[in-house]
Amino acid sequence: MPWGYWLVRIFRHQDIRTLGSGNIGASNVWRVYGRYLGLPVVLLDTAKGFVPALVATLVVGHGSGVLAGGAAMLGHYRPLFMKFRKGGKMVATTGGAFLGVAPLVGGAGAGVWIVVFVVTRYPSLASMVGTASLPLWSWLLGYPWPVTAFSAFAALAVLALHGANIGRLWRGEENRSQLWRRWWRKSSADARDASPSTSP
């Protein structure tokens, strides 16, 4: 389910692969069109990993949950509906898969993502650090070995798919998110408009 591609095609009649970084994932959709399309893509890509992983874990167990979550991640990377062409970088789908199969691990990884993003404003760096922390959280929280092995695989896969981002970060060329800056400017402007005038 390549939601980034479909939603942009439906609501903007454009091909997201020709815009921004050319990626169909939520980060590129958010960067090009803002939160009104970016947020639905985040939620749908997360649900794409969450639902099958949760159902498989509840019905069978962690081993099946890992397989279902991994299948959703691979499907995001090479979508069936795009004839297995290049898809997204699996970050949101990975987060959803871990929220389904190991909620504490997924929640801790999401917390790391938020902290790194707030401090640096690099979504790519937050994605890599948050995913790389998953094996540690799985081990510390005592989840069974399939979950820990799955978290290590997910971390390596996400890092590999962010190779170009790593290069840009090293050269100081990676784009920072403007989300907080825009919010701060709007809040400051609203505060100025709401403050009483001091002129006589």
Image (cartoon, rainbow, N blue to C red):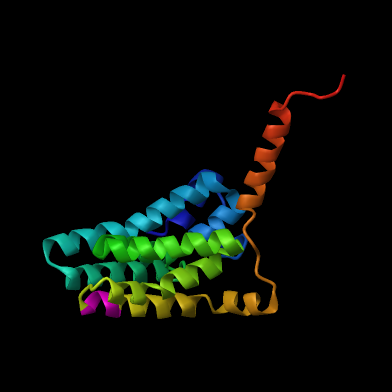
Task: Answer whether residue 147 is magenta in the image.
Answer: yes
Residue 15 at x, y percent in the picture: 55, 57
Q: Which residues are magenta?
A: 145-149
Q: Nearer the viewer, residue 56 or 141?
A: 141
Question: Along the horizontal axis of the image, is 75 left or right of 20?
Answer: left
Residue 185 image position (x, y, % from top left): 69, 43
Q: Quadrant of the N terminus?
A: bottom left
Is residue 188 among the parts visible in the rendering?
yes
Hey, which quadrant is residue 199 in on the image? top right
Dominant SS in magenta:
helix
x and y, in percent, of residue 25 in the image: 49, 61
**Residue at figure coordinates x 22%, y 79% from the top left:** 145
**Where 13 falls versus 4 (above or below)?**
above
Residue 193 sits in which quadrant? top right
Q: Position of residue 152 (x, y in %)?
A: 35, 80
| Total numbered badges shown on the rendered structure | 0
For the point 25% across and 74% down, the residue is 147
Residue at (65% x, 65% y) in the render = 175
Is residue 114 covered in magenta?
no
Q: Is residue 152 above or below residue 179?
A: below
In the visual, does 119 lie left or right of 144? right
Rendered view: 12 above or below 163: above
Q: Is residue 79 visible?
A: no
